[in-house]
Amino acid sequence: MNKTVIVASALLRIPGSPRSSNAQDFGNAKMIAPEDGDRLATLRGFGLSGDPTKISTLIAELNAPTHPYSKITAMKAIGQLGSDKALAALDSVIQNDRDPVNRLVAAVTRSRVIAEVAAKGIADPTLRASTKLNKFLQSLERTGSRISAAVPAQVQEVKTTPDRIPGIELLALREIADMIYRNRDSALLQAAVSQGIDFQLESASALKIRLAEMSAAQRISTLVDELAILKVMAGDAYHKVQLAVDEGAPAGAAVAAKLAVMDRQRDRYKYIGFAALFNIARALGDKTLEPVIARFLNDADGWISYYARQVYPNVRAGLRSQYRAGY
């Protein structure tokens, strides 16, 4: 066993500090400078693009981060691209980074990269899925049943202590859910369930599984409709916002259409629903949505006006942002 694997194994067995400066941002939305938000959204977009030429930029971000949260964002993108060119950089984070959240995310991302590389070129969907899942679990030295056994307590810890570091099993569950979601991989879902992985144990993971087999249009419609009827901006609201934002410009068009409907049917929608859709517009940074948001700047409902004013500068400037760095 080489030095990197030894270090990674030790990391996964020792929980380390129960607190981290990154932990709250990992689980909750952060208000950051618009220019920084745009940079983080760009890094996130590299992973969503599937463009392997972006890997060098992401590796550079690990070696010289431009923002306290950029390492997590870059590592999530690296995992989605599944390039083994990033393994050395991930090993360096595992061994040398002082923040335990960065080290844990690096370990999970490293396992995903190993799994993605191992599964490439396998034509049979069932064999590809089992290979990917087994490689992922083996690299983390975990089993599906062990993940499911540990997650409930970890979910509760994160919920009651906002700056609590997520456990490795919770991060692993989220990563497997993301692999299924991004690729609409029903075979991987079946493989995970057969190994005792229960995605219903954590609502953010369950959300991705619920949407996994939908088309892009269906995902957008579902997310926008569910956010529009919100009465409280809590629970998985920001997870839904982030997933809608990840769908890009079509989500912006859906938001514009929905806001027009909501404006005509004020008795059916609360101001929180307007705020949620405004947040999608803000994170997209789509300048074509400027007149849509501007319509509500002087709204008779003071809360709707307030939230429109909060997002309008970003939309007007075309600056993007992200709400869930680790999701």
Image (cartoon, rainbow, N blue to C red):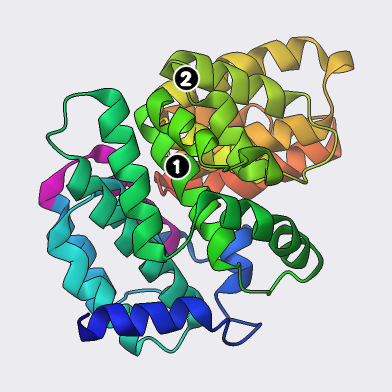
Q: Which residue is mark 1?
A: 178
Q: How many marks?
A: 2
Visible residue check, residue 75: no
Magenta region, residue range: 36-53
| Residue 82, magenta (yes or no) | no
Front-most of 303 and 99?
99
| Residue 48, magenta (yes or no) | yes
Q: Position of residue 2 (x, y in %)?
A: 20, 82
Query: In the rendered view, does 64 fall on the left or right side of 180?
Result: left
Q: Main secondary structure of the magenta part?
A: helix
Front-most of 318 and 250?
250
Position of the N terminus, as image quadrant, is: bottom left
Query: Disc number at residue 213?
Result: 2
Q: Going 75% across and 38% down the picture, which residue do you hit?
A: 305
Q: Quadrant of residue 221?
A: top right
Q: Position of residue 12 (x, y in %)?
A: 47, 76
Q: Position of residue 118 (x, y in %)?
A: 19, 47
Q: Identify residue type, mark 2.
A: Glu
Front-most of 245 and 212?
212
Query: In the rendered view, does 151 fall on the left or right side of 320?
Result: right
Q: The residue tagged with tag 2: helix, strand or loop?
A: loop
Q: Identify residue type, mark 1.
A: Asp
Q: Earlier in the sequence, mark 2 or mark 1?
A: 1
Front-most of 24 and 151?
151
Q: Quadrant of residue 295?
A: top right
Mark 1 closeness class: few <14, some 14–19, many ≥20 residues within 10 Å: many
